[in-house]
Amino acid sequence: MRVLHVQRAKGVAGSERHLLTLLPALAARGHDVRICVLEAAGGERFTAALRERGVDAVAIRAGPDVNPVAVARLRREIRAFRPDVVHTHLVHGDLHGLVAARLCGVPSVSSVHGCPAFYRREPWRSVGRLAGRLARRRIAISTFVADFIAELGLSPAGTVTVVHYGIDADRWQVSAEERTATRSSLELGPTDIAVAIVARLIPGKGHASVIDAIRTGLERDPHLRLLVVGDGPLRAELEERARQLPAGTAQLLGWVGDVRPVMGACDLVLFPTEPALGEGFGLAALEALAVGRPVIATDVASLPEVVTHGHDGLIVPPSDPGALADAIVELAADPDLRRRFGEQGSASARERFSVEAMVDGTLAVYAAASAPA
């Protein structure tokens, strides 16, 4: 099968990391895959990462939110590549890619990667509903996202399939030697308990709650150390907040191309999303499980689909630094519990979220979309 993907990108976040796994996996199954990246500022990082993995990536300037020039360029790419299916991602990919596919008479699939609040207001609700009618099938990356689509009527009944993100758990393994070397490079001592949050520095990811929780937790365990991985508009504000912690407690590492070694150097990983964000899946939480690290996540959106409380991590209420601090201190004090959660999380990543299952689910949707109407 020949498939053309379309996504607007301004960096490498969750949906981009997903495609960096999905597209090479589709190609490995013998399918002809190409992606058109609508590049906003920073999107060139995503295009470069795709090409490093051997993916045929075409860069197109994103331009404004509604860009007829991008639609025209996508039509040319569709006519040249002649795909069996066009697969679009995120609202801008939908808006431009689905229109171009319809104009070319090619069946299309749209993936919904989150539950952003803007879909609850116009004109974006109408854009989302239009996308759901232009696409023959829709993929929701979690049951929570599928429920959101149904609630807002973003797709006709019977056209939505849940296909979870997948991960190559073997690639995420970290050796004891690598863990030691990375901890040394981060100036972490043997008794330090390294706690990481890996997320864009944007509202809704819970960074302020994390810093407050670490401040409280230090009163009970002075060995806690915080690593903040990611970049974004809140960086200056969070740096100022982190400076209020004892010296040497927190490091803001900025954007990290390969988060695996950092996660491997940690003792636990936090995913304290707030309800307003509309988290669609929580890929960093799955990555932490694959590395073999316990996860503390909030009881928000799709996160309980990824992290199982008392099995591979702990689930706490959102926007509650006190509850988050209690969970951090509980795991910091119990290395056996951390080890057990880590082993069970790694197994969960292999058994419930394999790349093979993700590819199988995606190909089944393609088959349904390309079948005669």
Image (tube, helix red, strand yellow):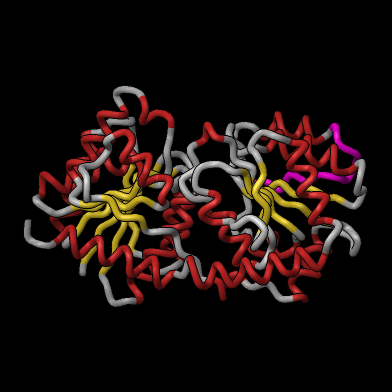
- The residue that appears at 34% across and 45% down in the rendered structure is 38
**Where 203 sits versus 221, above or below?**
above
Residues drawn in magenta: 244-254
Residue 82: % across, % down: 14, 61
In the image, residue 249 lies in the stretch drawn in magenta: yes
Q: Is 369 situated left or right of 312 in this image?
A: left
**Quadrant of res 309:** bottom right
Q: Is 16 situated left or right of 282 in this image?
A: left
Q: Nearer the viewer, residue 154 or 52?
A: 154
Q: Quadrant of the C terminus?
A: bottom left
- The residue that appears at 40% across and 45% down in the rendered structure is 145
**Where 357 sits versus 125, above or below?**
below
Residue 35: % across, % down: 31, 57
Farthest residue to the front: give it: 310
Q: Is 76 situated left or right of 236 in this image?
A: left
Q: Nearer the viewer, residue 66 or 148?
A: 148
**Quadrant of res 177:** bottom right
- The residue that appears at 25% across and 29% down in the rendered structure is 126
Residue 73 appears in view = no
Q: Is 76 situated left or right of 94 in this image?
A: left
Farthest residue to the top: give it: 122
Residue 351 appears in view = yes
In the image, residue 365 lies in the stretch drawn in magenta: no
**Quadrant of res 182:** bottom right
- The residue that appears at 25% across and 58% down in the rendered structure is 4
Residue 122: % across, % down: 31, 22
